[in-house]
Amino acid sequence: MLNPTTIFVTGGSRSGKSTFARRRAESLEGRKVFVATAMPIDDEMRARILAHKRERGGQWDTVEEPLDLVGVIERLKDRYEVIVIDCLTIWLTNVVLAWEDRLVEGGIVRLAERLRQVRGDVDILIVSNEVGMGIVPDGALSRRFRDHAGLLNQMVAEVCDEAYLIVSGMPLRLK
Amino acid sequence: MLNPTTIFVTGGSRSGKSTFARRRAESLEGRKVFVATAMPIDDEMRARILAHKRERGGQWDTVEEPLDLVGVIERLKDRYEVIVIDCLTIWLTNVVLAWEDRLVEGGIVRLAERLRQVRGDVDILIVSNEVGMGIVPDGALSRRFRDHAGLLNQMVAEVCDEAYLIVSGMPLRLK
Amino acid sequence: MLNPTTIFVTGGSRSGKSTFARRRAESLEGRKVFVATAMPIDDEMRARILAHKRERGGQWDTVEEPLDLVGVIERLKDRYEVIVIDCLTIWLTNVVLAWEDRLVEGGIVRLAERLRQVRGDVDILIVSNEVGMGIVPDGALSRRFRDHAGLLNQMVAEVCDEAYLIVSGMPLRLK
């Protein structure tokens, strides 16, 4: 049996990141759980969540966790062989709305640290988003979010064994 | 003689995508046609179109087709050896303005299907744009456009033989 | 001793571009100077500049030059072995604010030309930004900036010996 692997998957919106992560997860053995960070707060979001659920089909368990990813990894790591977390930037949006700004960076550091610690215990695939390759946004809030997202991606990617940038459905291997 | 190839070229704005596609096309043998999807609706657009035309020089025929790419491929494939379509996201903008939203996805599927069918008949180079790597846009319309563009790039890239992401004028090979 | 090298480093905001350039510079021998193009015009910018300065530590000299990069390269190239310029898009912002629009392109051409000429005299690392992979911005000014930035990245990357796209802290080699 192969060693459990921690895999970081990033890309633009609708680039095929989730599909790439799901297929890679389905190629791995064992019980699989999908951790959805999105909250069905409006119709647009509800439709996206449902569409993703249908794509995964019945062989997956789904857990919704908007904020406490450290806790959810702790709870799930002994009950499943494969955990997919989708996605980090939605989690970050939830965190930014829920916490004071000065606490966000600490939350990112704790998440990366937890991922480093469970490396080798369970296969984890983490989906994130590229949000920093457009024009500088007007709002200070958007600029701060972009900064947090960049830090998050760097810190999480660093503790992963593999990392990919998905473009138009195809992977560029980062490490 | 080499087999005709279908090539997908994507990248950010002014990344050198069109130049890459044009040079690649000029390295191929046979009569060449450039399919422009942009409409000269204002001075800014008119200036861009003219600048591109000057770069291509006199050895190219140019066809303007804002909407019916399936039809234009059909008409041109027996009269030319090399077809460049530039670019898919402008076409998508035209389609989104002209059609009802629920019809857009069908149009994308039909275009990808047509490209799959003509594979091997004629060299086709298709230029597209990355639009999904910035911050989530405020407007629902922009978010839908981004979703459509992501789907479009995935579906078209999938039926192509080669695919490239152009960054600062240089190609990263996707497949 | 190795030949001096000109290295282009691009990527999204907070992708780890500056860190990559700094580490690469620190692996090179000789006196090092950091050319900061950012002006401490508000608290947000002042905080960023200070944070970067702390990361570099005491072994670096720092020169602030918002506009005249051609002149600064000329002045520094015989006094240092390694020059880091960080970053080109901030320089472009300064240039766009200071100069008439029709002069911007000429300034880009002169900078690229100067970099080509000093190639082989001194190690130069140039940090830039990807700003063209988001949705088309609403404002004509933002679109023009994006166009200028795309041209700038293409022209500067072309005269460099090496080029990298940094994603989530990891480099994709462009050339």
Image (cartoon, coloured by chain):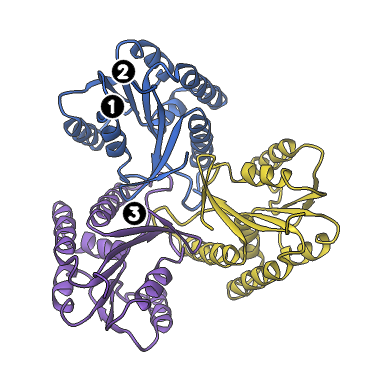
Chain colours: A yellow, B blue, C purple
At 73% from the left edge and 59% from the top edge, which residue is drawn? Answer: A3
Type of residue at label 1?
A: Leu
Q: Quadrant of residue B163?
A: top left
Vertically, is A79 above or below B137?
below
Quadrant where the N terminus of chain A sits is bottom right
The answer to whether the residues at label 3 and label 2 have Cβ atoms under 8 Å apart is no
Q: Which chain's residue wears label 1?
A: B
CB within 8 Å, label 1 to label 3: no
Q: CA distance from mark 1 to mark 3?
A: 24 Å
Measuring from the top left, give residue C55's x and y in whole percent: 43, 81
Q: Answer with mark 1 or mark 2, whichever residue precedes in sequence.
A: 1
Residue A91 percent coordinates (x, y):
65, 59
Residue B72 x/y as whole percent: 37, 15
Residue A42 visible, this orientation:
no
The residue wearing badge 2 is: B81
What is the secondary structure assignment of the residue under circle 2? loop
Q: Nearer the viewer, residue C88 or B169?
A: B169
Q: Which residue is mark 3?
A: C175
On whether disc 1 and disc 3 are found on a single subunit, the reply is: no
Check residue C51 in the rendering and tell me which mark sits there, or answer none.
none
Q: Mark 1 vs mark 2: tell me if same chain.
A: yes
Q: Nearer the viewer, residue A135 or A162?
A: A162
Q: Tell me which amino acid carries mark 3.
A: Lys
Q: Is residue A68 left or right of residue B14?
A: right
Q: Which mark is residue B28?
A: 1
- Neighbor class of circle 2 (other Cα within 10 Å; few <14, some 14-19, many 20+) is some
